[in-house]
Image: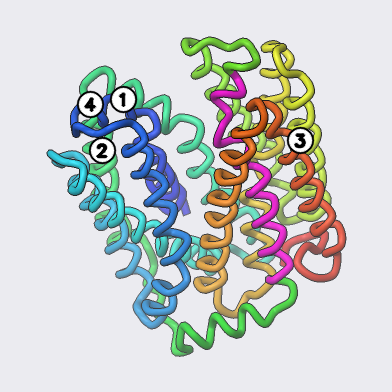
Amino acid sequence: MLLLSVGGFLAVATEVLPIGLLPLMAADLGVNESSIGLLVSAYAAVVVFASIPLNAWTSALPRKSLLVGLLAGYGASNIVLCLAQDYPTALTGRILAGACHALFFAVVFGYASRLAPRGRLGAAMALVNAGNAVAIAVGVPLSTWLGATVGWRWSFGCAAIIALILSVGASVVMPAIGGSAVSGGTQLREALAEPALRRVILAVVVMMTAQFALYTFITPVLLQSGFTAGNVGFALLAYGGAGILGLALCSRFTDSALRPALLVSLLAMSVSFLGIALLGGAPGWTLAVVILWGLLYGPVPAYVQTAAMSAFRDHPDTVAAVHNSTFNLGISAGALVGAELLLVTEPSGIGYAAAALALIALAVVYMGARQGFPRASA
């Protein structure tokens, strides 16, 4: 389970690595910063469109071999970035990494659901998501520092080394789990026929759209509120640290009180988004609200992953793939919504739309007491 958690850290850190290295990579590869930004969006696009079909095509393969191969794939993709001398090569490496990511979490959460003791599914999901939370909190600051200190290529080189070590470790410590005798297409049809899973999908799309409409543009929001380019990083680190703390404090509710805990988080997110929109130029209060936001959002990925895996237990890898695609669809939609709103309003104004979307997600969860969001996990 710890290896799966560290694997989650690697996957999410790989996804966000270019964010903190934009100027360095752009100058070295001879392109503008928006083109380097495309290395992040192209990665996410591959995840959205490839998660479900890749899982269907590989559903019969042994899970251990697939996990080892995916970790090795992360290693190869980061080596490509480390050695890239031009933009097309860098983009190729990112597409390879996105393809690994598209399948990786389906395998990881499928593994975790099978390893979890009965009644402790939520704890297993929280443990794996801990690696993701740490990657979000420290991935960008750490890669930025490493890139400025020894060069941006070493950020990808270190990620490649970690991936290859994990690949060897997985081949040694992970138990063998066979593939499914049921075809991937049949698994998908059976999973999507479950009303509870469909409700979870709807809730996840709406809440992730709300989250990333504002979070994607958190830097301009903080600058508008009075932060400087020098201390924005501190605020982002405070947000990430609050997320880790929130996951640590609230993960106990994932099994025992999933629905109430998620409702509290969504309400707190709505209040935080509205507070950011109303506060405008008050840096101290804005930082307090951002910390509250991070604290209550921290356990949300574990909550919704557990809800999805509990909604349909027959084919965990397929459910994890659907959730992975759904989650990233919400991320992409949120970034698009925020970008469009930024054309007509100041950055903090995005908070109004994010708050409204979070309240809609809250209503979907609240009405799912019987289907999708029971009080406790299965």
- Which secondary structure class fits the magenta region best? helix
The nearer-to-camera label among 2 and 3 is 3
Secondary-structure class at tag 2:
helix
Determine which residue is flagged by label 3: 352
Tags 1 and 2 in contact by the CB under 8 Å rule? no
Of badges 2 and 4, the one in the foreground is: 4
Q: Nearer the viewer, mark 1 or mark 2?
A: 1
Marks 4/1: CA–CA distance: 6 Å
**Residue 23, label in figure:** 1
Circle 1 SS class: helix
Position of 295 with respect to 165 (left or right) is right
Residue indicated by mark 2: 156
Per the rendered image, the range of residues in magenta is: 198-222
Q: Amino acid at mark 4?
A: Ala
Q: How many marks?
A: 4
Q: Are marks 2 and 3 in contact (CB under 8 Å)?
A: no
Q: Secondary structure at mark 4?
A: helix
Q: Are marks 4 and 1 in contact (CB under 8 Å)?
A: yes
Measure the C-alpha gap from mark 3 to mark 4.
37 Å
